[in-house]
Image: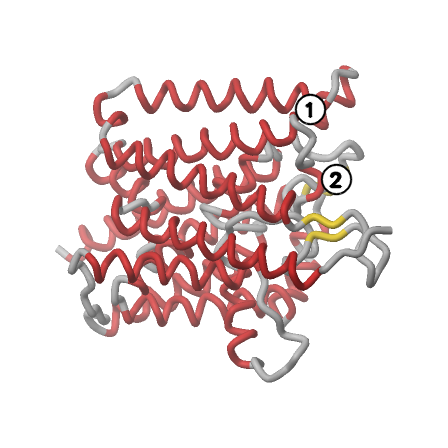
Amino acid sequence: MQDVDIHAIATRVLWAAFALSMAFGAISQRTQFCTMGAVADIVTMGDWTRMRMWVLAMAVAMLGFNAMVALGWLDAGDSIYASPRLRWLSALLGGLLFGFGMVLGSGCGSKTLVRVGGGSLKSLVVFVVMGLAAFATLKGITAVARVATVDAVAVNVPAGQDLPSLLSAATGVAKETLALVLGGAFATAMALWVLMRPEGRSADVLLAGLGVGAVVAGVWWVSGRLGHVAEDPNTLQEAFVATNSQRMESLTFVAPLAYTLDWLMFYSDRSKVLTLGIVSTFGVVAGSALYALATRAFRWEGFRGAEDTANHLVGAVLMGVGGVTALGCTIGQGLSGLSTLAIGSFIALASIIAGAVAALRYQAWRVQRGQ
């Protein structure tokens, strides 16, 4: 058997993920790429420009991932999103909590990191509280409640819950072929919707959509191809190097915030090592900060008062609990998960948007009531 240098592979994976996440942070800072902002623009102003950014990013990520599946490089079943157990209630409830929380917290996990890089001290507080809530929902008190309640409600899908696997089992057509056909069809339809309006062809929309989507697809390649080992010499089993889940991963920003805090607090513990999720967290902050400093957009920002502080704290807790329960955030489920064409990702994404709309309506009601 050929010798495999796991440490060297891990180093390459971590540096590549850090570079790609820096690009994500810089692009997001430059274009104001933000899912919560996209939904808010529609609800409050009827402006769909930023939503077109997000949809174009979905299209690019979906096309990239499924092209790699068709080439035999990746398999959706190697990710957490396309597992045979469809926890639909977790995706539904977790998505609602996350969507509501991201409005109260002024942005999702990725936007929180971008804002930290731009000088927002209140986003730094959101980062810490969200990470703690996520860790509790991964391994602590809310984890016990999650496992005993919503996670217990599930449907077993032997073929895997991604659409290519489901249709392959039903029709006998090769999964790789279906991935290319379905991924291409969805991506084309979404890209056409984006480009049909003049605002969808603006420089910011194209940069954010093409850039963010390409980064998500790139991290899939880094984790699933560059970091894949057919047989780990230490365990003699297949491995995806430098991931927290021990499976193929792309960008997501809920659980990685918890792992980042864990790594920082227990740095001297040699069992705590850098992972793709942790370096991606640092990378987004670094990329955002470099762009903000280079363009003189860096500004210190604090809370406006007690109510603003309370809203952000509640929002951070809801995002931490909801994001882990739903297996991801607007990036984790809305881009990375959706690119695999997993049913659970469609449910989670719809729930996140519904939760965000409900929170925006709630805030508008509060304002009207106070007048």
Relative to 96, 39 lies left or right: left
Cα gap from disc 2 to disc 1, whole angstroms: 18 Å
Relative to 253, 24 lies left or right: left
Residue 255 or residue 316, whichever sits in front: 255
Residue type at mark 1 is Glu
Residue 275 or residue 232, whichever sits in front: 232
Q: Position of residue 73 (x, y in %)?
A: 67, 35
Mark 1 = which residue?
A: 176
Q: Which circle's residue, 2 or 1, is located before the other in the chain?
A: 2
Query: In the current view of this chain or complex, which residue is farthest to the front?
Result: 2
Relative to 259, 358 lies left or right: left
Q: Residue at x 80, y 34 (%)?
A: 158
- For label 1, the SS is helix
Q: Position of residue 8 (x, y in %)?
A: 65, 60
Q: Position of residue 70 (x, y in %)?
A: 65, 25
How packed mark 2 is, by other alpha carbons closer than 10 Å (few <14, some 14-19, many 20 or more), is: some
Query: Which dot, 2 or 1, sits closer to the camera?
Result: 1
Q: Residue at x 54, y 36 (%)?
A: 338
Query: In the current view of this chain or complex, which residue is farthest to the bottom?
Result: 268
Can you tell which mark lies on residue 84?
A: 2
Residue type at mark 2 is Pro
Displayed quadrant of residue 82: top right
Q: Residue at x 51, y 77 (%)?
A: 264
Q: Residue at x 40, y 52 (%)?
A: 100
Give the answer, above or below, for where 51 lies relative to 227.
Answer: above
